[in-house]
Amino acid sequence: MSDDDGDEAEPAVELGEGPDVEGAPVARVASRLTWPQERSRIEDKEGDAVIRTPDGPRELSAVLADVEETYFDRRQAFLAEVRDVIGHGPVETAE
């Protein structure tokens, strides 16, 4: 329960006024899956998801085509492999 008088609560964190970022964070996509997973099952379930990369948005299936691993025992292993392909760094914003 809260000390409010029943009015609609304000968001805990205010969102910025900056430009939008296309795609979803790869960690959000990974959180929708259960682990372990085979690459082919990930492609079937989330392959059409568009993820954020430093070079702009990309479909997860295109990124997974460049990943050599075929089996991910943990979410962290999946994220490490994907980030090795897409790179690390700031993400482009929509114009």
Image: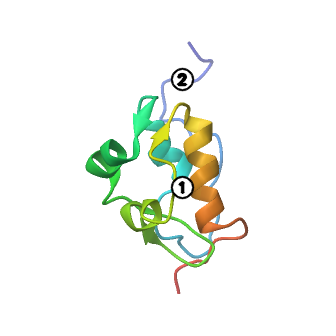
Vertical order, 34 against 44 (above or below): above
For the point 73% across and 68% down, which residue is it? 89
Q: How many marks?
A: 2
Residue found at x 59% / y 78%: 55
Residue plotted at (53% across, 31% down): 73
Disc 1 is placed on an element classified as loop
> Which image quarter holds the N terminus?
top right
Decide which of 11, 93 is in the foreground and name it. Answer: 93
Residue underneath mark 1: 25
Q: What residue is pinned by disc 2?
A: 5
Query: Who is closer to the viewer here, 3 or 58?
Result: 58
| Residue at 32% over, 52% down | 43
Determine whether the residue tagged by mark 2 lies in a helix, strand or loop: loop
Amino acid type assigned to the residue bearing label 2 in the image: Asp
Which amino acid type is shown beneath numbered disc 1?
Pro
Crowd band around label 1 with a 10 angstrom C-alpha radius: few (<14), some (14–19), many (20+): some
Q: Image quadrant of residue 54?
A: bottom right
Residue closest to the far right: 89
How much space separates mark 2 and mark 1, taking CA atoms?
36 Å
- Camera-nearest label, 2 or 1: 1
Q: Is residue 48 left or right of residue 56?
A: left
State which tag comes first along the sequence, 2 or 1: 2
Q: Nearer the viewer, residue 48 or 70?
A: 70
Residue 58, image x and y in percent? Answer: 45, 71
Q: Residue furthest left?
A: 44
